[in-house]
Amino acid sequence: MTKKSKNIIEVSMGEGEVALHPYILTSAGLGSCVVAALYDTRRRIGGMAHIMIPKYSGSSNNGRYAYADMAIKKLLREMQCKGAKLPDIVAKVAGGAKMFSYDDGGESIGEQIVAGVRTHLRKKGIQVTGVDTGGSRGRSVKFYLDTGRMVVKTLGREDKVI
């Protein structure tokens, strides 16, 4: 469930949110999950999805924001309803850690989600301006809609601004 308090909107696993400045979109507990954050640089409209699955298979009851392909489409649609224009939208991507030992075979679930997000952003012609993905540690993010900067917190590492 998305929580709002003051100017902070918390985006939980499988959820998404679109807002305008001066809001801050946050998401915690990113392990293999990925946050895709879209930002209209002129209108200061932003959206964030906490994505859990690389691709929608048509057979699950998870919300549309849970899937990389569906989340990007839904964020764009909701941002455009608030006045965002596609040529002015950029993206930031965080998460996708390799959290499980059984991910040792091929591409981990986190890597699959990151690849899915990048594929769908590329299809829409959206430039990725910030990335903090991979590794083996979880993350939390804060996405500031007044500037479009994202602060990524990772255990045992300095905060990173993307």
Image (cartoon, rainbow, N blue to C red):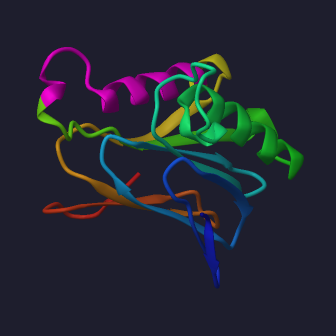
Q: Quadrant of residue 87?
A: top right
Question: At 26% across and 25% down in the image, what residue appears?
Answer: 108
Which residue range is magenta in the image? Answer: 102-120
Foreground pick, 131 / 55: 55
Compared with residue 125, is residue 95 higher up or lower down, i.e. above or below? below
Q: Which residue occupies the extreme bottom position in the image?
A: 6
Q: Where is residue 96 shown, x and y percent of the image?
A: 33, 38
- Predominant secondary structure in magenta? helix
Residue located at (59% from left, 39% from top)? 62
| Residue 95 x, y percent position in the rendering | 35, 44
Return the x and y of residue 17 as percentages of the image width and height. 67, 55
The stretch drawn in magenta includes residue 112? yes
Give above or below for 96 relative to 158: above
**Vertical placement of residue 147 versus 16, above or below:** below
In screen coordinates, is 5 left or right of 54? right
Residue 72, image x and y in percent?
64, 33
- Residue at image location 65% in from the left, 22% down from the top: 125
Q: Between 46 and 58, which is closer to the camera in this rendering?
A: 58
Image-quadrant location for residue 91 = top right
Tell me which residue sits at (58%, 30%) in the image: 60
